[in-house]
Image (cartoon, grey):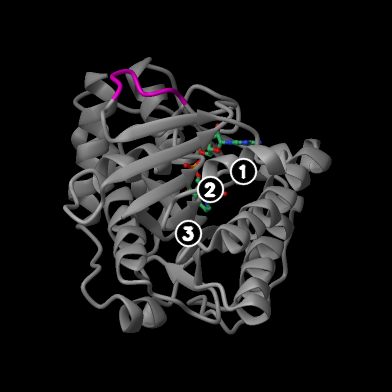
Amino acid sequence: MDILITGGCGFIGTNLVNHLLTQPEVERVRTLDDYVTGRRREVPHARVEEIEGDLRNYDDVLRATEGVDAVVHLGALPSVPRSIKDPFSTNAVNVDGTLHVLEAARVTGVQHVSVASSSSVYGANPALPKTESLATLPLSPYAVTKLATEAYTNAYSTSYGLNTIAFRFFNVFGPLQRADHVYAAVIPKFLLALKNNEPLTVFGDGEQSRDFTSIHAVTDAITKAALRTVTCGTPVNLAFGTRTSLNGVIALLQELHNRPIKVEYVEPRQGDVKHSQASSELLSSLLPDVVQPDFVHALKEVYDWYMGS
Ligand SMILES: NC(=O)c1ccc[n+]([C@@H]2O[C@H](COP(=O)([O-])OP(=O)(O)OC[C@H]3O[C@@H](n4cnc5c(N)ncnc54)[C@H](O)[C@@H]3O)[C@@H](O)[C@H]2O)c1
């Protein structure tokens, strides 16, 4: 099987490429990326083809899609604050880009398409855990683009019979996640601060909680969905129903770190939700053998990776 990964040089994409290369069924992996946040592979691999291109350009997407059996669409501008500052760019990449990917998959006869949505679509809906049938109440332009992503994906399934699945990722963390840009996610930001002996910045009181999901579970689920052509008519939460506060993460990091950790609490950030926790029932019914690695173990892995890198 040959697989295209859009955004395949980003955090989740690079981990996914590495995981796919361990699968005997996968012959070649192709990535489409414009390297806005992603990085080129340092060491070329005989089974990996990197295509430089822009999701906003349909011809780039079509060229990258020709000849592949499956597509994993991860490419996006994945930041809430960025989308608030510049909604047009986020919309162009995330919404037009998704439409280009789905259309290219349709016209080239791709067998399976997985797309990346986000828990941010639940937005202002306070219900916990987040079951997929809950009303979506996006709080940011980014969340709207992810809602459009999954809606377009479902529409391509019902209108054209494309085999699709849209995963709602929660807070994914793991090695290779970048901390060196203003829109970085919280765990890599904390780890970079620790590495640089700087205080950890927390927006709000630190009691906000997230369903932190190990990258290994995410790459495992996406891979199994592609290899088994798993489809679903509704979006699927890709998380396991755990919930850890930022103060809880800091307490665990304190146990791993030999020196005292300083924390600075600042004003809450616009567009951020207070609590997030998935219902994982649908995921378990579709992919029962995808399991969440132990959180403390996964946090130690990523801590060791940051401190060593
Ligand atoms: N990491 C998370 O916790 C999380 C949570 C929810 C949803 N997601 C979604 O998962 C996907 C992957 O996220 P990630 O954390 O790996 O982010 P990332 O920024 O590391 O990866 C995104 C990739 O898309 C590429 N890209 C951006 N604009 C592009 C364009 N116009 N053309 C081609 N490539 C482009 C970037 O260069 C990058 O390699 C995104 O769709 C994101 O919205 C991630």
Taking the image in four quarters, ligand 1 sits in the one at: top right
Residue receiving disc 1: 61
Residue receiving disc 2: 65
Instruction: Using the image, tell me which numbered label, if any, was put on residue 271.
Output: none
Q: Residues within 10 Å of mark 2 (few under 14, many from 20)?
A: many
Q: Tell me where residue 65 appears, x and y as whole percent.
A: 53, 48
Which image quadrant is residue 17 in? top left
Q: Tell me where residue 93 appears, x and y as whole percent.
A: 70, 43
Dot 2 amino acid type: Thr
Q: Is mark 1 within 8 Å of ligand 1?
A: no
**Residue at screen point 45% across, 52% down:** 171
Q: Is residue 137 magenta?
A: no
Decide if residue 88 is on the left or right side of residue 76. right
Q: Gap in Å between the C-alphas at discs 3 and 2?
A: 23 Å
Q: Is mark 2 within 8 Å of ligand 1?
A: no
**Residue at screen point 34% across, 28% down:** 261
Q: Are marks 1 and 2 in contact (CB under 8 Å)?
A: yes
**Residue at screen point 48% across, 79% down:** 232
Find the magenta span and give its range.
39-44
Dot 3 amino acid type: Phe
Q: Could you say whether the residue bearing mark 3 is in a helix, strand or loop? A: strand
Q: Considering the image in quadrants, where does the C terminus appear?
A: top left
Decide if residue 94 is on the left or right side of residue 265. right
Instruction: Using the image, tell me which numbered label, if any, was put on residue 169.
Output: 3
Q: Is residue 42 magenta?
A: yes
Instruction: Give the mark, 3 or 1, whose residue is nearer the N terminus.
Output: 1
